Image: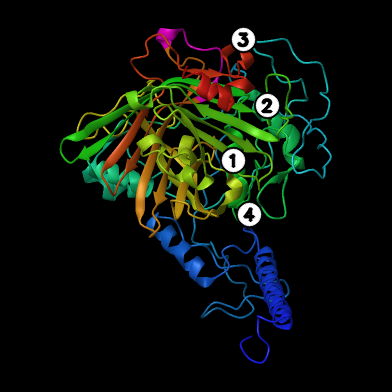
């Protein structure tokens, strides 16, 4: 536009051209600012999510496929009486939206036994701790009494008044009545899928149709550990969600929201924070983990391709600590919530001495610092957050699926789809698990029991994430995840993670057991249902004779130190 009377070759032309470019730049800045402002004004997930009819329709479709009831219509605004149903007198109040749903009967409290895992008899509730403005409490109030003496080699939680069980939230309608169950001791196979599909997730149905079987056993109660139950009672009253629903305010330890109302629009977010807080321990070291990958050949079973054996999988938590000082919070210099690592690889040869390590931070807006070490190239590579949805070193398992879900809850939009009864392996009798005979050797050989679960839908906020959504089944009593399902970017069912949990003070008799009563994971399988592929894992490896595999809350005594998560340690162990 400067080719007319004023030329860019003259001083006046050059001056005019500069003014033009400045004006264009200003317009771009204004447009970008408007875009950011619009993005900042986007409502956070929680109340009002989903916000469009198309989204709501997609959730109803998913509920129908998972065998869940349709979500009742929203309540009428105050002051506006609901319209009467067709044929109903105008002066007669309409029936409630869920009148046809049969609520679950209240679960009886577990009988008291002489164990530290059962809460003492109820007395008056202790005064709630005052609310604080900080997002996460860095330190807790002073204990009310001196700590008790050490029991079984670990410090116990501070003495406080015996807790009163929090008032139960209204029981939601549960699909799959506890009266409509297979007989105890029966075996469910492919021919029985149609009869019992209301108790099975899609990935479990797929497994049965490909030769797997399920042995049905009676449900067993799963109480919280005594220290976690005391922390829940002491601190839960002060916990709130932040305004953006991405974090918690005033969280110290225990389960933050033990009385979630299923009608709460933030129920999905709160339940996932419960699930993540349930798996918090002071420290853990799982040793000698073995995973095999292979193709599931119809009629023949798994044709093994590769075996991965790792020396250590470690976690060290800085919040929610229950046993070792500093507790309940340990202030990390870099603001870490916890650190995690898995190294060194022992097999296969091309990964020998390799591994990964990452740090999760208290700030929900701060991405993980994650590092991969490749021994062949002798290079450390930084891993992006989106890569957490990819298989690690060629496995079907991704980092965000460890233990059912180990991603950052803040980076996912959560929605409670409903509550149902399913069959799940929550009390495995073997450590490590055994695998079923071919052609079903992609599934562990354990008994499954009826469990009530929350069915929660998660959709990642991260760009370039590998999944469109995941459905997570969270056990209502323990908050552990028996299985979950992953959908590809086209919305098609892709992978299923099936896990066998167990509890108790004895992990492996041939290694002398252990001195804790905790949850642990003897085995799991991540099944790629589109490629007929599987990664199945044993924790610990059955050939690791003499090692109990799981080491919980040992502090520095078993090597779970801050230095063990450093990149220098990741590299140094290879030399």
Precedes in sequence: disc 4 or disc 3? 3
- Range covered by the magenta-colored residues: 509-519
Callout in the foreground (4, 2):
2
Front residue of this view, candidates 413 and 563: 563
Instruction: Describe the element under mark 2 as helix, strand or loop.
Output: loop
Q: Which residue is mark 3?
A: 152
Looking at marks 3 and 2 on the same chain, the residue that comes earlier in the sequence is marked by: 3
Across and down, in percent, residue 228 comes to 65, 28
Is the C-beta separation of discs 1 and 4 under 8 Å?
no
**Residue at (68% x, 29% y) in the render:** 318
**How packed is label 2: few (under 14 Cα within 10 Å), some, or many (20 or more)?**
many
In this orientation, which residue lies closer to the viewer: 21 or 277?
21
Query: Can you identify the residue that label 4 sits on?
Result: 266
Image-based side of 160 in relation to 458, left or right: right
**Towards the viewer: 113 or 54:** 54
- Which numbered mark, 1 or 4, is in the foreground of this view? 1
Which mark sits nearer the N-terminus, 2 or 1? 2
Farthest residue in the bottom direction? 5
Q: Indicate yes or no whether the magenta region holds residue 493.
A: no
Question: Which residue is labeled 1 in the image?
Answer: 368
Which is more N-terminal, label 3 or label 1?
3
Q: Which residue is label 2 attached to?
A: 321
Identify the element where label 3 is drawn: loop
Q: Earlier in the sequence, mark 4 or mark 2?
A: 4
């Amino acid at each position: 536009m400067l080719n007319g009377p004023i030329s860019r070759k003259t001083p006046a032309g050059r001056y005019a051209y500069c003014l033009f470019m400045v004006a264009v730049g200003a317009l771009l800045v204004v447009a970008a600012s408007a875009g950011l402002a619009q993005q900042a004004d986007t409502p956070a997930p929680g109340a009002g999510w989903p916000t469009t009819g198309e989204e709501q329709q997609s959730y109803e479709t998913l509920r129908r496929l998972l065998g869940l009831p349709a979500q009742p219509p929203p309540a009428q605004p105050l002051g506006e009486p609901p319209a009467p149903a067709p044929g109903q007198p105008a002066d007669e109040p309409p029936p409630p939206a869920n009148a046809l749903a049969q609520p679950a009967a209240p679960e009886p409290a577990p009988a008291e036994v002489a164990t530290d895992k059962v809460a003492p008899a109820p007395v008056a509730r202790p005064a709630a701790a005052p609310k604080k403005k900080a997002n996460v409490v860095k330190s807790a109030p002073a204990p009310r009494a001196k700590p008790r003496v050490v029991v079984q080699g670990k410090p116990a939680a501070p003495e406080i008044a015996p807790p009163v069980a929090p008032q139960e939230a209204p029981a939601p309608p549960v699909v799959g009545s506890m009266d409509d169950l297979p007989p105890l001791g029966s075996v469910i196979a492919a021919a029985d899928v149609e009869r019992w599909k209301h108790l099975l997730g899609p990935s479990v149905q797929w497994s049965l149709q490909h030769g797997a079987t399920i042995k049905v056993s009676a449900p067993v109660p799963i109480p919280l550990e005594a220290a976690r139950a005391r922390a829940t009672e002491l601190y839960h009253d002060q916990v709130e969600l932040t305004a953006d629903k991405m974090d918690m305010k005033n969280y110290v330890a225990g389960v933050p929201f033990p009385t979630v109302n299923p009608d709460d629009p933030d129920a999905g977010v709160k339940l996932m924070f419960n699930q993540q807080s349930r798996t918090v321990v002071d420290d853990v070291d799982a040793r000698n983990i073995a995973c095999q990958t292979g193709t599931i050949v119809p009629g023949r079973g798994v044709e093994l391709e590769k075996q991965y054996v790792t020396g250590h999988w470690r976690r060290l938590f800085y919040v929610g600590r229950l046993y070792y000082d500093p507790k309940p919070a340990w202030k990390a210099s870099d603001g870490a919530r916890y650190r995690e690592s898995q190294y060194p690889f022992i097999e296969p040869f091309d990964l020998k001495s390799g591994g990964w390590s990452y740090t999760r931070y208290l700030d929900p807006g701060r991405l993980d610092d994650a590092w991969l070490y490749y021994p062949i190239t002798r290079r450390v590579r930084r891993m992006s957050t989106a890569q957490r949805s990819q298989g690690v070193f060629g496995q079907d398992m991704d980092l965000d699926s460890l233990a059912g879900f180990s991603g950052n809850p803040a980076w996912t939009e959560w929605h409670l789809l409903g509550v149902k009864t399913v069959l799940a392996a929550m009390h495995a009798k073997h450590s490590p698990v055994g695998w079923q005979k071919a052609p079903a050797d992609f599934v562990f050989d354990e008994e499954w029991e009826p469990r009530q679960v929350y069915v929660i839908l998660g959709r990642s906020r991260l760009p370039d994430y590998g999944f469109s959504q995941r459905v997570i089944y969270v056990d209502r009593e323990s908050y552990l995840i028996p299985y979950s399902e992953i959908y590809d970017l086209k919305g098609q069912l892709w992978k299923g993670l099936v896990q066998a949990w167990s509890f108790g003070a004895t992990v492996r008799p041939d290694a002398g057991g252990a001195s804790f009563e905790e949850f642990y994971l003897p085995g799991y399988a991540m099944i790629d249902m589109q490629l007929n592929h599987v990664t199945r894992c044993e924790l610990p490896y059955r050939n690791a004779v003499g090692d109990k595999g799981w080491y919980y809350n040992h502090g520095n005594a078993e090597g779970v130190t801050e230095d063990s998560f450093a990149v220098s340690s990741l590299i140094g162990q290879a030399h």
